[in-house]
Image (cartoon, rainbow, N blue to C red):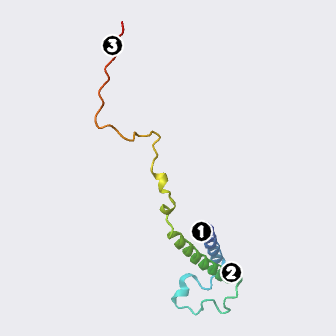
Amino acid sequence: MTSTLLIVQFALAVIITITVLLQKSASMGLGAYSGSNDSVFGAKGPGNVLTKATFILAALFIANTLSLGYFYNQERLQSAVDSVETKSLIPQSPIALPKATPAAPSAPAVPAAPSK
């Protein structure tokens, strides 16, 4: 789910950038910030199709960002260590060890006398 939302996030970022760059500038560069008489959207308001598209895309971008944050936070509560089986971490020896070892070695047996 999060990978799909992340792809949508990148696509929205590219589309928003393109729609902002396609819009006609209401003022000359940074002159809008120096106290010009233009309002934020000009005299006609946000009636332009690109402006409306930018608002819609920005709302989708914000909603997608919030949902990504929610889903990443839900995944943070789960740990990869919780899903590991601890029985599989202990190696099982294929060779069986003797159950009890004698305290002292036994004496060697006396060889039988050769028969004549």
Judge from the rendering whether residue 77 lies leftward or rightward of residue 100; answer left or right: right
| Image spot of residue 32 (x, y percent) | 55, 87
- Give amino acid for label 3: Ala
Q: Along the polypeptide, which appears first: circle 3 or circle 2? A: 2
| Image spot of residue 26 (x, y percent) | 62, 85
Residue beneath disc 2? 53
Q: In what element is the residue under mark 1?
A: helix
- Give amino acid for label 1: Thr
Q: Residue at x 58, y 93 (%)?
A: 37
Q: Along the polypeptide, which appears first: circle 1 or circle 3? A: 1
Marks 1/2 in contact by CB < 8 Å: the verdict is: no
| Image spot of residue 109 (x, y percent) | 32, 23
Which-is-in-front pick, marks 1 and 3? 3
Residue beneath disc 1? 2
* The C terminus: image quadrant: top left
Judge from the rendering whether residue 12 lies leftward or rightward of residue 104; answer left or right: right
Q: In what element is the residue under mark 3?
A: loop
Q: Residues within 10 Å of mark 2 (few under 14, many from 20)?
A: some
Residue beneath disc 3? 113
With respect to residue 91, does 40 lie above or below? Answer: below
Q: Along the polypeptide, which appears first: circle 1 or circle 2? A: 1
Measured Cα–Cα span from mark 1 to mark 2: 25 Å
